[in-house]
Amino acid sequence: MTSSNQRSRALVGGVERAGARAMLKAVGYDDDALAKPLIGVANTWTEIGPCNFHLRKLAADVKRGIRAAGGTPFEFNTVSISDGITMGTEGMKGSLISREVIADSIELVAKSNMLDGVVALSACDKTIPGTIMALIRLDLPSLMLYGGTIYPGKLNGRDIDLVNVFEALGQFQAGQISYEELMAVENVACPGPGACGGQFTANTMAMISEILGICPMGMGDVPAEDPEKETVAYQAGELMLDILQRDIRPSQLVTRQSLENSLAAAAATAGSTNSILHCLAFAREAGIDFSLDDIEDISRRTPIIGDMRPTGKYVALDLFKAGGVPILINRLIDGGYMTGDTPTVSGVTLAEACADATETPGQDVVRDFDAAIKDSGGLVVLKGNLAPAGAVVKLKDTPAPLTGPARVFDTEEEAFEAVSNRRIVAGDVVIIRYEGPVGGPGMREMLQITAALYGQGLGGEVGLITDGRFSGGTRGLMIGHCAPEAAVGGPIALLEEGDSITIDVARRLIQVDLSEEELAARRSRWQAPTPNYHKGVMAKYARLVSQADDGAVTGA
């Protein structure tokens, strides 16, 4: 027994563990392999969608690296739900729920099998935070490796991605393009494996994983189909044995300071608002005091310097070619917006991990501060009598205040039907409620609706407010995570058709023009709806989940 394998001796060490060893020998492990540190390779591979499709190959590369460095890999799998595929259907409710299932399942397997350490492979929106949450809970020597971004599709000489498909759908519904033109976009938007290419949830969270220090710096930047991905996967496997020797654990990496650094980077790139939800979840898992107000303060003081889609011009591949996440971090550290002394899984500080970054001459993906896109960050927290606990919006610019009539819908389907049939007009404020953590359950993301409105030319002309999510592809006044949600009696449940709603980003205000007396009267008449599910995973999640401003967690 060594310091690197002492945990797994409870599983395979000693005469009394002969039965366990016999069963493991049945699947190919011998005495030499079982005497080494046992490293779990938690894989989120699936062939349902491109994001995680290639992780089976990456797992093989990781395992080669583990064996070469003197460890024995034990690969196991967990679930993955694709936001892009399930978007607009009841299946989208499972996306955020899957984050909890991923974390629970990895925790269960690693604990039950007394593993000495874990390498977690992730790629899509919820597998990244789900794996990180599991590693925080386990607090074993471990790392997470991101599978990488997809390459952009090409159409008529320009790069396109999944958001272009949804926007083309809106244009088709508005009669602006033909069915053949819609199919031309659909057929090339996603050319192969990898996660959605813009600064949507996957790439925002991958960047955050490197800044937290739990994904080795630079390894997540490498695109899914880049030949270098095999090399970094092998290196991640090798690194795992060094992490064991150094006894580097997530509790050393996920700190208040590393969370602040992470949200600064998300704000500086106008990243997904899901980064707020997931970083709050990390804080809850780690027992760190961290709130929406803290995130708002970080975003207010951090300028946008990353010109990234969907609010900007470039995709993750462009950032990789420009020098990767390290050049963004160096810029933010030099500007005083991020601290460089936080530790990383590689055994060096964040600043040291980025010290050798090479910035491509002439790149303009990451700007200098004197050419900042905006002097405050892209993640904005609004509060008011409609969302006393907060609501979030991603913005590149600060739009003019909007006051308009509430168009109230109790499901995403009702709202999308109204949008599709052109019943939403400029100046409307669309309310989509009972889609929150409890009400949906699962906080469906509604990119289909936002993209359809943009396709119809209404993206900057209407407001949308939901207790579900508008995140990765959000542009304009698309406000999600409204808390407390309708299903628990939040103010959004009290709205009626035609109520006057004001959204004022400059004042960080979201309110309905109703007196406290009228809100109280409506609250006295309100009755909680019958839950959408009475048994199974959906019902269990709804019973356990916290509100969005608390990370929508079930296990912390």
Image (cartoon, rainbow, N blue to C red):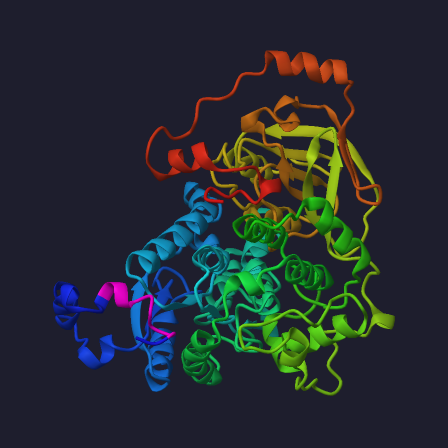
In the image, residue 475 lies at what x, y percent?
A: 69, 52
Residue 476 appears in the figure: no
Determine the main secondary structure of the stretch shown in magenta. loop
Q: Which residues are magenta?
A: 3-11
Q: At 60% from the left edge and 49% from the top edge, which residue is drawn?
A: 280
The residue at 66%/86% (across/down) is: 356
On the image, the x and y values in percent for residue 36 come to: 29, 78
**514 or 341: nearer the eye?**
341
Q: Quadrant of the N terminus?
A: bottom left
Q: Position of residue 546 (x, y in %)?
A: 53, 37
- Looking at the image, residue 137 sits to the left or right of residue 310; the answer is left
Residue 297 drawn above or below residue 65: above
Hey, which residue is sitting farthest right in the picture? Answer: 370
**Residue 26 or 162: which is nearer the viewer?**
26
In the rendered structure, does residue 502 fall within the stretch colored magenta? no
Q: Position of residue 206 (x, y in %)?
A: 55, 66
